[in-house]
Image (cartoon, coloured by chain):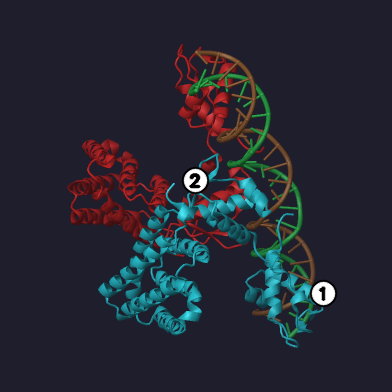
Chain colours: A red, B cyan, C green, D brown
Amino acid sequence: MARQNTVFKEAYNRYAVALRTDTALPSEPEIAAQLGVSRSTARAILTRLSEEGIIRWNKRQKTVLRQPTDRDLFPSEETDSLHDIIERSFMQRILADDAAPGMQINELELAREIGTGTTSVREFLIRFSRFGLIEKRPNSHWTLKGFTREFALELADVREMFELHSAAEFGRLSRDNQAWIDLAAMRDEHLAMLGDINERFKDFSVLDERFHLLIHRASKNRFIADFYDAIAIIFHYHYQWNKTAARERNERAIHEHLDYIAALDSGDQAAIEKACRVHLRSARQTLLQSLPQIAESA
Amino acid sequence: MARQNTVFKEAYNRYAVALRTDTALPSEPEIAAQLGVSRSTARAILTRLSEEGIIRWNKRQKTVLRQPTDRDLFPSEETDSLHDIIERSFMQRILADDAAPGMQINELELAREIGTGTTSVREFLIRFSRFGLIEKRPNSHWTLKGFTREFALELADVREMFELHSAAEFGRLSRDNQAWIDLAAMRDEHLAMLGDINERFKDFSVLDERFHLLIHRASKNRFIADFYDAIAIIFHYHYQWNKTAARERNERAIHEHLDYIAALDSGDQAAIEKACRVHLRSARQTLLQSLPQIAESA
DNA sequence: ATTTTGTTTTTTATCTACAATAAACATTTT
DNA sequence: AAAATGTTTATTGTAGATAAAAAACAAAAT
């Protein structure tokens, strides 16, 4: 098999669930644009919808005959892209207890366990290597460097440099910039979450990511943006893993964010830097406390 | 063909030129370690040296019979690793005049022109993408973002953050650290080059890279180190390309380096920061001036 | 004249195979 | 017994093939 048609299946599901009986569908290019796929794929979706009797399709006439049921959709295992499958599987492995720093990573073994070819695994590892968690010796194996204390400290250092820079840039944005509106909305979301913290503290990590992304966008720097992508992925898996004292930790972080937002809003660079440093210091503590115990420096 | 034996050929050449008639060669593991290859490859080298009548090899007895000549060596085209070939070829293309920002990059076309398979080109592009000069749209083509003014400014911003951090860390190193000895040697090299600047100004870029690498090593941060790798590669090709006013530019940079070294040596953090900023400001200017004219923001 | 659909071509994503290289194991030599 | 050599096995690096997806081209409809 050369390639899975996951793009088609995933887009098919996405389109099918949004269909409403008796409505007319737009033109092929419009459907393609809505779904973010090519017209070829959009046509493949229409073809299948037609074959399944979900729509009647004749050139420009496209009418929804019936609501698709769950049985019309592709199962979720078939809609995940190979890259996502590999990423999830790999992250689970390196966060598992028996993944000790210094461990070798075997491409063929990994590919077999995930049930995929070696090329995809190789490409994933190359992409993933920029997160600093694995390293390759040429003509030889990859080595897991792991979530060690060194890793956390190095990550935190760079994060602080970048965030202080971005926060300062944010403070310099002209007042008619969309970012200020987004920031105000963000404050409201923080307040809302705080009002129902006992129920909603688990949603904080998503809000946290969006908040810092908003700040970082102000710097308009591709290297900072890339680094934040890396952080987001690492935190995404890491927080799924480590959930100790989440409520207290998140509540405190929300308060810090609110102070930080107020400082940004004031436009006072000294206040911004101060609030940013306060938050970054506790974020660093959180990160260090959440390290897996076995992953001490190799 | 599955794989070129460039590791073997390159190591063979390296070992052959160092041979001296009538000397005895060490054990296989030792040879392998010297060359930085596996014993399998070391044995392949000994086998060929023996077949060519350059050595007599009988178990532990390995004697050099004659000095290898140029004709014994593999031609340089056969010793370059595929990765290096692709890198060189690709950098030449994106620095060429007709490489406009926004241009599409075609994997298959690139592979054919370089005379290699698509897999290697893909992997190269994935690795190269972290330098921020190209970008991929999933399921579609790569786009050349190019050496634009934005790129230079973003690069310079991050470089400044990192170098200020590293320089401060350097100033905090304990006095018995090897880095101080290296720094003193580095100052002497700068002075020597300055004494013969008209002849040697072209060697500055190598010294410049080594100098900044020394500074950055003090921060012991993998993200900073990786970023500096990227800078070094980009500058390597970029400076080969742009050579305007090299003598004056380099002479001034040497003076700045010497001031910077003196500041580091003093251990005074304020002086370090000042000297570092002075140098970084002119380095930024140099970078901006060296931009290709056509590569203005797309 | 522009937009939509129909059809063909190009390009990417992924698998498989295999030589080069590294690594492991076994035997011999000192 | 430790280190070297001899031999076998495992793993990586790369080419080539192919289905999926995108893109380009052509014809038809508003």
Residue at 36 percent of width and 75 percent of height: B256
Q: Which residue is mark 2?
A: B102
The N terminus of chain B - image quarter: bottom right
Quarter of the rendering containing residue B97: bottom right
Q: Amino acid at mark 2?
A: Gly
Q: Is residue B109 visible?
A: yes
- Mark 1 falls on what kind of element? helix
Q: Nearer the viewer, mark 2 or mark 1?
A: 2
Q: Amino acid at mark 1?
A: Glu
User: Which of these two is toward me, D7 or A50?
Assistant: A50
Q: Which residue is mark 1?
A: B51
User: Which of these two is toward me, B279 or C22?
Assistant: B279
Residue at 70 percent of width and 68 percent of height: B8
Give the x, y percent position of residue B181.
41, 83
Give the x, y percent position of residue B286.
40, 65
Quarter of the rendering containing residue A8: top right
